[in-house]
Amino acid sequence: MPDGAEDVTILVPGKLHSHAVSRIGERFRLMAVERSDPALLTDEMKRSVVGVAASGAISSAFMDALPKLQIVASFGVGYDAVDAAHAGRKGIVVTNTPDVLTEEVADTALGLLINTVRELPKAENYLREGRWRREGAYPLTCATLRGRSVGIFGMGRIGRAIARRVEAFGLPVSYHNRRKVEDAPYAYHQTLVGLAEAVDTLISVAPGGAATEKAVNAEVLRALGPNGVFINVGRGSTVDEAALAAALRDGTILAAGLDVFADEPNVPDSLLSLGNACLLPHVASASVHTRQAMADLVVDNLVAWFTRGAPLTPVAETAHLKEP
């Protein structure tokens, strides 16, 4: 383990929160590269880089091109873009930024749900366009939160925070997870289809990856039903977007609110054209307060690793790794 900060070289590929970059530059020797492409790595980087701080994809090939790499500090709670399984096999620690964004994302999920059901963005546009004055009151919304039942896909930290908020609205909560959460006081459904059949409002906070690829598909949407509302603040990859657009278009479900998409920032025209889809540009954690806290945790993980050999928030695939 290097003794001094001047001996520890951290590489930042692509864009990273400026607060994180500033702190890394103050604490370590900082290098930067345009993107996480092994072809862009210089010989000096290959010789000296022991840590990577990134807000985006880090492939196995990129890790392999840095023979002295010890840690990848990822900005964000989701880390499906980082090959953590490969890192674990190579003895490289991967960290993420959980907890510090939990409440912000949960707040956004409920805001998006309300906007979707009560059409508040559309009502504001109606006012701004002068239509209230010209045409009278905005039409009554056909949907309401009253009488709804909510299912949560992914009962992790954020899922629990959303559940607490949903309960405060006086609505029942149930959930689907890979496995039952023993201390969660909500009805558990072993399948996502079973959950969708039992509720009329489905909120997805599931992580990305092969296990959840297009998990919210046509069958799930049919089970949700014509009064169904779908909200996604997890990962766009968990949704079959073509099936969702078709379900919204033909009335299979009532409405959807989406903060994430499969190919960001490219949102399909099939969704953009729909009046019953409330769409946000991946802003669930996007406040100055929360993004700075995430940036701090990225750097704090690096500091913890290079000072005491124990990161603060290692991901599951690398939690077993200790100081070399």
Image: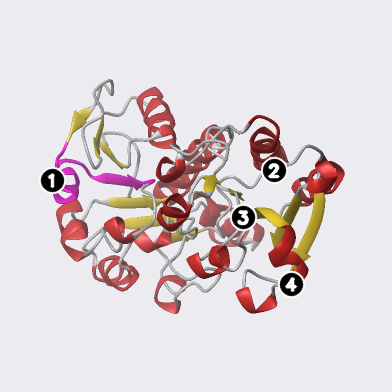
Residue 74 counted in the magenta span: no
Q: Please state which amino acid type lies under the numbered disc 3.
A: Leu
Q: Secondary structure at mark 1?
A: helix
Identify the mark nearer the N-term, 2 or 4. 4
Between marks 3 and 4, how big is the CA–CA gap?
14 Å
Q: Amino acid at mark 2?
A: Ala
Q: Nearer the viewer, residue 178 or 254?
A: 178
Amino acid tagged 1: Gly
Task: Give the magenta part as a residue range.
Answer: 189-205
Residue indicated by mark 1: 194
How far apart are the alpha carbons under marks 2 and 4? 28 Å
Given residues 77 and 306, the one toward you in this image is 306
3D distance between C-alphas at marks 2 and 1: 38 Å
Earlier-in-chain disc, 3 versus 1: 3
Q: Which residue is mark 4?
A: 43
Say which mark, if any, is on residue 295: 2
Looking at the picture, which amino acid does disc 4 mark? Answer: Asp
